[in-house]
Image (tube, rainbow, N blue to C red):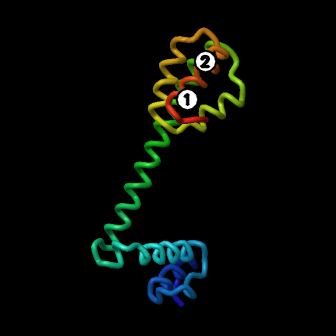
Amino acid sequence: QKGGSQSIKNMLHFIENSDKSSAVDTETQELEQYIRKVKLDPEVRRGLVTFGDYIDRECREAADKAKSEAKIEERVECILDLLSERGEISPELEARLYAQNDMECLKKLLKLVAHVESVEEFEVQMDEVLKNTMAPV
């Protein structure tokens, strides 16, 4: 028996055997589930994309989603920062803003916060903005 961590031994054993019974720890079980998911993808099954292409696409989509979520969170935090200068923000209002994931609505709300005098005025007008954009929170 050669040295090395058990985790590496498990991974090598899984790669060598490539079956569900070889997935004996969390890492190899996750890899086995991922491989099963890839094999079910219609494009992979038809040979239109390679395993590497599939992984690249999944990684790009995950990165794009993360960037989008970060931009949304950044915009909400900007709204909250400006709004905090106009009064105390209730946890409910903060939750409503964080629940909003439409960038156009958030853009309108950012403009709105620049023109209101109070948090209360913002809330009333926010409801109108959201009602008119068909993106309720």
Q: What residue type is labelled 2?
A: Phe
Question: In the picture, residue 96 is in which quadrant?
Answer: top right
Locate the N terminus and report the quarter of the image it occupies.
Answer: bottom right
Residue 105, given in percent of the width and then of the height, sits at 49, 30
Q: What element carries label 1?
A: helix
Dot 2 falls on a residue whose secondary structure is helix
- Measure how far apart labels 2 and 1 are at the Cα level: 12 Å
Q: Do the residues labelled 2 and 1 touch (CB within 8 Å)?
A: no
Amino acid identity at mark 1: Leu
Residue placed under numbered mark 2 in the picture: 122
Q: Which of marks 2 and 1 is nearer the N terminus?
A: 2
As drawn, the label of residue 130 is: 1
Residue 60: x %, y % from top left = 37, 55
Q: Which of 61 and 21 is in front in this view?
A: 61
Q: How crowded is mark 1: few (under 14 residues within 10 Å), some or many (20 or more)?
A: some
From the viewer's side, name the closer residue of 107 and 76. 107
Image location (x, y in percent) of residue 12: 47, 82
Quarter holding residue 81: top right
Instruction: Tell me if residue 104 comes above or below residue 65 in the rendering.
Output: above
Name the residue at the top extreme: 117
Residue 62 as seen in the image, left or right of residue 48 = right
Provide residue 136's location: percent of width, then percent of height.
58, 35
Farthest residue to the left: give it.
48
**Neighbour tally class for label 2: few under 14, some 14-19, many 20 plus, Cα within 10 Å:** some
The residue lying at 48 percent from left, 24 percent from top is 108
In the depicted structure, whether residue 32 falls above or below residue 99:
below
| Residue occupying the point 63% across, 14% down | 121
